[in-house]
Image (cartoon, rainbow, N blue to C red):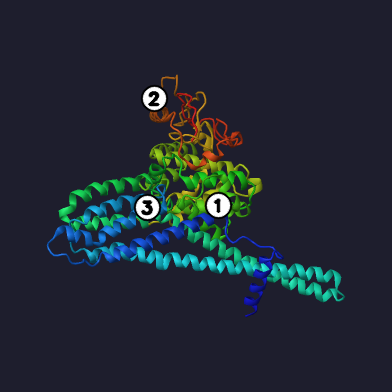
Amino acid sequence: MKKQFLRVKQLANQTVGRAEKTEVLSDELLQIEKKIDNVKLATHNVTKKLSACQQLQGGGDNLDKRMKKLPQSALSQSMLESSALMGDDALLGALFQLCGEGQGNLAKDLTNYEMEVEKTVMTPLTNLQEVDIPAIQTQRKRLAKLVLDMDSARSRYHSAIRSSNTGGNQAAAMAKAESLKDEMDDAQSRMNLCRDALATDMYQFVSKEQEYAHNLISLVEAQIRFHRAAISSLEKVLPAMKGQLEQAMMKPVYGLSLEEHLKITERDIALPLEACALALLEWGMEEEGLFRVAGSSSKTKKLKAALDSGIITGLADLEEYVQDVHSISGALKLYLRELPEPLMTFDLFQDWMEAGSTQDPQVKLQALWSVCDRLPKQNYNNFRYLIKFLATISGNSEVNKMSASNLALVLAPNLIWSREEGGLGVMVTGVASMIVQTIIQHADWFFPGEFDFQPSTPGSAGSTPQGSSTMLSAVGDSAEPVNGSGDYSPLADKHAAHTESTQHEVTQSEGKRSSGIWNKIGNRKSSSLKKPNSPPPQTPSSFPTRKNTSSVTTAL
């Protein structure tokens, strides 16, 4: 009762302008809220008309009379109106348009399909408007109350501070002020948690638009099966709807295979990897315990939902995580772990383990290089990007306390695991950590050339080889140059083929601008993010270096 009274009092003071008012939602969340309201209105209208289609009206054998009474005609009109309400740019709006046209044709050949329509179409749409959306709206109302509680506590705290400066019993007044400050901090904490939860629900709602739109696909497919007489007209509308869905397709990136994610987004580097790496390079280089210390659970979940929903459109969208960069590193670790296949692949698991178990340092480096070079192109590009990024982080280990060994210890289980076990045993974990540690320590040897973490065009993966280096043989006690010496080296031939293939792929992609989300920050200088084209200091002179056959200017 007291809280309700304080809320009413605070609301009255805010109405007449005597108290400060905190905005409940940001502009971005207000737009999503408006979209949710439109979706609710549209699905309500469509569900209502679809329900009317579950009972045919009379009309005898006269086809024309029955067609005039069929509710499918009203459903078609409702879908077209809903399409206009949603707009042509919205995926649901485009599908409503196409589906509405198909319903008009289906009115000629209605048969009994009510049960399947109810199961595959009506129930999901009803749950959307009666369960999913109301849950978000309830959370929205709760947030509004918590905002009022925080504003009220803040007003009472400021009033107590003023009273302590003018009253007689200052000790009691200050004690009361401290109590009110604790109440204000608690109210603000509860408000922030509720706001993050609401934002997560809204982002998840946006990310499920494809799922909601797929209900309309199910409606059309059911009608194909039960309306054989109208199959020709349905087969015309169905490809158009699926084509529209594929063109505007947006899938959550977490749990999606790397190959499919890169194909859909037309990227070379996975969105969570690039987004989190750029943010950490910008704000987290001096953060102690990066990747080892856990971030805020709510912030990590919120960032994951934002990446899944496509809300992240630039580095500026990640500024709210500056105060908790560990949530950014946590989101990156979570992405790597949730890949259906690890970045270092199932097929090469045994080869990695054998190479990592080699005792001779030079032979081990040769073996690891050979396995790394056999990674699929997409895995190779993303693995190179990650290793270069981790090498940059470890280069500042005096400040952030994350050396190559520390990074490998926390990240190796997220980069490699076996297909059968789904995880790493104690012994295997040690080998995996040593593999990742070695590659991080020798990042410039495994991946020579300058490196730009901020790509601008597809078809490249950040590496910019410069000049030509000498390939040295690490077999035996003699280390002879491979290029120009006449000696044969399988690794040299393998690398030359790999370089030629990479150059061809990069040349094919020149001129094609990236559709990635980082165009908004394309002018940010990246010179400080480039690595020198030389082996690391700890690399022995007899270690083989990759032979660069050409100079390729690339940018992601």
Q: Position of residue 132 (x, y in %)?
A: 42, 65
Q: Which of 153 and 278 is in front in this view?
A: 153
Q: Nearer the viewer's eye, disc 2 or disc 1? A: 1
Quick one: SS at disc 3? helix
Q: Where is residue 339 in the image (x, y as percent from the top left)?
A: 41, 51
Marks 2 and 3, how far apart at CA: 67 Å
Q: Position of residue 120 (x, y in %)?
A: 29, 62
* Residue designated by label 2: 488
Q: Say left or right for 312 vs 61.
A: right
Disc number for residue 328: 1
> Mark 2, residues whose alpha carbon is within 10 Å: few (<14), some, or many (≥20)?
few
Q: Nearer the viewer's eye, disc 2 or disc 3? A: 3
Residue 384 in the image: above or below residue 297: above
The residue lying furthest to the bottom in this view is 1
Residue at 45% across, 53% down = 337
User: Which of marks 3 and 2 precedes in the sequence?
Assistant: 3
Marks 2 and 1, how far apart at CA: 46 Å
Q: Nearer the viewer, residue 322 or 480?
A: 322
* Residue designated by label 3: 83
Marks 3 and 1, how far apart at CA: 38 Å
Quick one: SS at disc 2? loop
